[in-house]
Image (cartoon, rainbow, N blue to C red):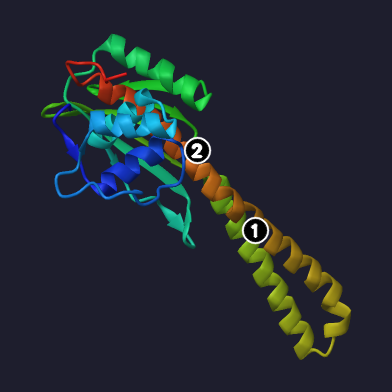
Amino acid sequence: MADRRYTDDEISAIFAKAAEAPQQPALQASGDEGLTLAELQQIGREAGISSVAIAQAAHSLDVGALAAPRRLLGLPIGVERTIALNRRVSDEEWEHIVVRLREVFDARGTVREHGNFRQWTNGNLQALLEPTPTGHRLRLRTMKASARAGIGVGFITTGMGAFVALSAAMAGRLAAATPGVALMSLVGVGMMAFNAFSLPGWARLRGRQMDAIAGELAAGDDSDPPPS
């Protein structure tokens, strides 16, 4: 990776991952030729960002495909990464991967094997190790099912409140039904708002955790360790 040059968009993504901050455009254009990892690390040192963090972010960028997040009403409801490894993962390395998954996600999870396929799952959080022509790939994915359910229930509750209000108005009893309609609407909107506000932070956290795993595994693909 020493001769690898990164584009402006890639530089922005690397520094965003290394600093664990939302992705932003690069502060300074790198030109047509781009910047090497050593140059990125030099810039990072001047900005107070660890060289190791930048190296891991660069490695994860090379092997970890960032899938478009699954969305609900424009909100990230699912996060996924695909890490292409240029090697076969041994039984011992898979055990180490499982240990790291448990540490990073703070979950015990369940390990299963089906022929050449292996997986570690903890509810909706999944790590799938799959064979490829060049080695293995690790797919990490998760979905915030509770938020999706909460938003759905909120919509239903709000809709029921609107239906009751309409029915009461047609029957000439809107005044009597107003307290109940207001309560239903408040509960429905509250459920939607609570779950909607929690999703972006949850998605960022899961993305950083998956990027950390990707960076560590990517570093193992190179004959030379990441510069520190």
SS of the residue at dot 2? helix
Q: Up-down: is 182 above or below 44?
A: below
In x, y percent, where is residue 43?
Answer: 33, 34
In x, y percent, where is residue 139?
Answer: 31, 34
10 Å crowding of disc 1: few (<14), some (14-19), many (20+): some
10 Å crowding of disc 2: few (<14), some (14-19), many (20+): some
In x, y percent, where is residue 78?
Answer: 44, 47
Name the side, left or right, on which 145 lies relative to 42: right
Q: Nearer the viewer, residue 196 or 179?
A: 196
In x, y percent, where is residue 85?
Answer: 21, 27
Q: Up-down: is 145 above or below 71?
A: above
Identify which residue is drawn at 43% across, 39% down.
207
Numbered marks: total: 2
Point out which mark residue 193 bears: 1
Point out which mark residue 205 bears: 2
Determine if residue 119 is in view: no
CB under 8 Å between callouts 2 and 1? no
Q: Amino acid at mark 2?
A: Leu
Sequence-wise, the earlier of marks 2 and 1 is 1
Choose top left, top right, bottom left or bottom right for residue 65. top left
Quarter of the image for the N terminus: give it. top left
Identify which residue is drawn at 59% across, 57% down.
151
SS of the residue at dot 1? helix
